[in-house]
C-alpha cells in the first residue's frame, strides 16, 4: 500500500501487520520489531499475519504513561489537580519550549 493511501480500519476486528502498525501509530518496522515484547502474538490465516484489534488496544492501554522531564532530566510529578506539570523535554535538541522574543505590547485603540 502506498504511503499516501489511507487505511480504513473501521469495522475490522483483525488487522494485517501494516494495518496494525497504522492503528498503533508506528512504522511497520517498529511494529514488527516490538510487537512480541508487548505480548502481541499474530495468528496465521490464509498466509497472512493477523493481529486482534482489541489486543492492540489493550497493549496501548497497558503501556506506561508518557512522562515529561525537567531540564535536569528528572520526571515531573503530577500536580495537586491530578494533571502533570508542564515542562520542557530535555532531549537531544535541548529546550524546545517556545520563548517570547519581546514583551507583548497591546496595540493602541483607534480614536
Image (cartoon, grey):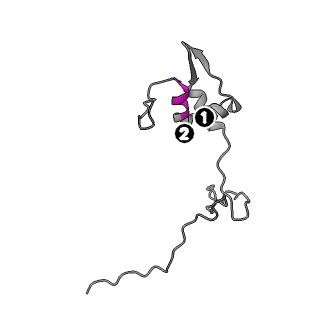
Q: What range of the chain is rendered magenta? A: 13-21
Quarter of the rendering containing residue 64 = top right
Q: Is residue 18 magenta?
A: yes
Q: Could you tell me how many numbered marks the image carries? A: 2
- Name of the residue lying farthest toward the bottom: 111
- Left or right, 62 with respect to 8, comes to right
- Which residue is at a point 51% across and 29% down the rendered structure image? 19
- Which residue is at a point 27% across and 84% down the rendered structure image? 110
Element type at marker 2? loop
Q: Is residue 85 magenta?
A: no
The numbered mark at residue 25 is 2
**Mark 1 or 2, closer to the camera:** 1
Q: Position of residue 100 (x, y in %)?
A: 51, 74
- Name of the residue lying farthest toward the left: 111
Q: Nearer the viewer, residue 79 or 62?
A: 62
Q: Nearer the viewer, residue 100 or 105?
A: 100
- Name of the residue lying farthest toward the top: 46
Q: Position of residue 48 (x, y in %)?
A: 55, 18
Q: Is 89 situated above or below 20?
A: below
Q: Position of residue 30 (x, y in %)?
A: 62, 37
- Which residue is at a point 55% across and 33% down the rendered structure image? 21
Badge 2: how crowded within 10 Å, few (<14), some, or many (20+)?
Answer: few
Residue bearing mark 1: 29
Element type at marker 1? helix
Quadrant where the C terminus sits is bottom left
Quarter of the rendering containing residue 61 = top right
Amino acid at each position: 500500500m502506498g504511503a499516501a493511501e489511507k487505511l480504513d480500519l473501521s469495522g475490522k476486528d483483525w488487522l494485517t501487520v501494516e494495518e496494525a502498525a497504522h492503528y498503533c501509530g508506528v512504522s511497520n518496522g517498529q511494529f514488527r520489531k516490538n510487537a512480541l515484547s508487548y505480548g502481541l502474538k499474530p495468528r496465521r490465516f490464509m498466509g497472512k499475519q493477523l493481529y486482534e484489534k482489541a489486543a492492540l488496544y489493550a497493549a496501548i492501554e497497558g503501556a506506561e504513561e508518557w512522562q515529561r522531564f525537567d531540564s535536569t532530566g528528572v520526571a515531573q510529578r503530577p500536580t495537586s489537580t491530578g494533571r502533570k506539570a508542564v515542562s520542557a523535554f530535555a532531549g537531544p535538541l535541548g529546550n524546545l519550549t517556545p520563548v517570547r522574543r519581546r514583551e507583548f505590547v497591546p496595540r493602541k485603540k483607534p480614536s
